[in-house]
């Protein structure tokens, strides 16, 4: 979602349903400076490498501006849903999390999207969350 959000920011008219892995890789090479300036994708890749290498991420070493990219509520906490709703406000390109935990915020955002981006958002939700709501909540958020 981060990369597709950046594509959308730079090319709002782009139909993201036509974007495949090869096209996206080419776009990334051509737009490396914008990706690095945004910082989220490189940060997520560093986190992935750190998890592969050490099996954990030290949250105290993470910049405050980026923490919500990887932090979610403790699944067993009684306010997990409320906490994830709050977190969704700080991860603007993660429309799936916002849809799951903050429908009002999602629909307010959705009203501002261009038609092509709306189509992409709907298709992404259909293929991920709406296909298996409980499964996605369990896999991504640890919620049953």
Image (cartoon, grey):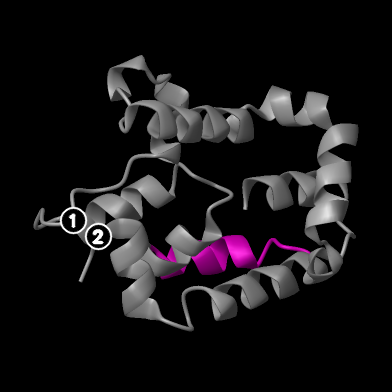
Mark 1 vs mark 2: which is more N-terminal? Answer: 1
Asked if the residue at tag 2 contacts the one at tag 1, i.e. Cβ–Cβ closer than 8 Å, the answer is yes
Secondary structure of the residue carrying numbered label 2: loop
Relative to 71, 74 lies left or right: left
- How many other residues sit within 10 Å of disc 2, few (<14), some (14-19) or many (≥20)? some
Span shown in magenta: 102-114
* Residue underneath mark 2: 142
Front residue of this view, candidates 17 and 54: 54
Helix, strand or loop status at disc 1: loop
What residue is disc 1 on?
Answer: 75
Residue 131: percent from left, percent from top: 48, 84
Residue at (62%, 71%) from the top-left corner?
124
Instruction: Spot the residue most to the front.
Output: 53
Q: Quadrant of residue 68?
A: top left
Packing grade of label 1 (10 A; few <14, some 14-19, many >=20) is some
**Which residue is at a point 14% across and 55% down the rendered structure image?**
79
Q: Position of residue 76 (x, y in %)?
A: 11, 56
């Amino acid at each position: 979602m981060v990369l597709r959000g950046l594509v959308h920011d730079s090319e709002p008219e782009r139909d993201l349903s036509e974007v495949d892995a090869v096209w996206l890789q080419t776009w990334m090479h051509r737009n490396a400076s914008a990706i690095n300036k945004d910082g989220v994708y490189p940060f997520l890749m560093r986190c992935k490498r750190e998890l592969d290498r050490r099996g954990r991420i030290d949250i105290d070493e993470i910049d405050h501006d980026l923490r919500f990219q990887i932090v979610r509520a403790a699944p067993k906490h009684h306010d997990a849903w409320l906490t994830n709703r709050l977190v969704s406000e700080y991860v603007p390109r993660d429309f799936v999390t916002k849809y799951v935990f903050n429908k009002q915020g999602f629909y307010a955002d959705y009203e501002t999207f261009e038609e092509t981006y709306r189509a992409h958002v709907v298709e992404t939700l259909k293929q991920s969350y709406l296909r298996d709501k409980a499964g996605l909540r369990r896999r991504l958020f640890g919620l049953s």
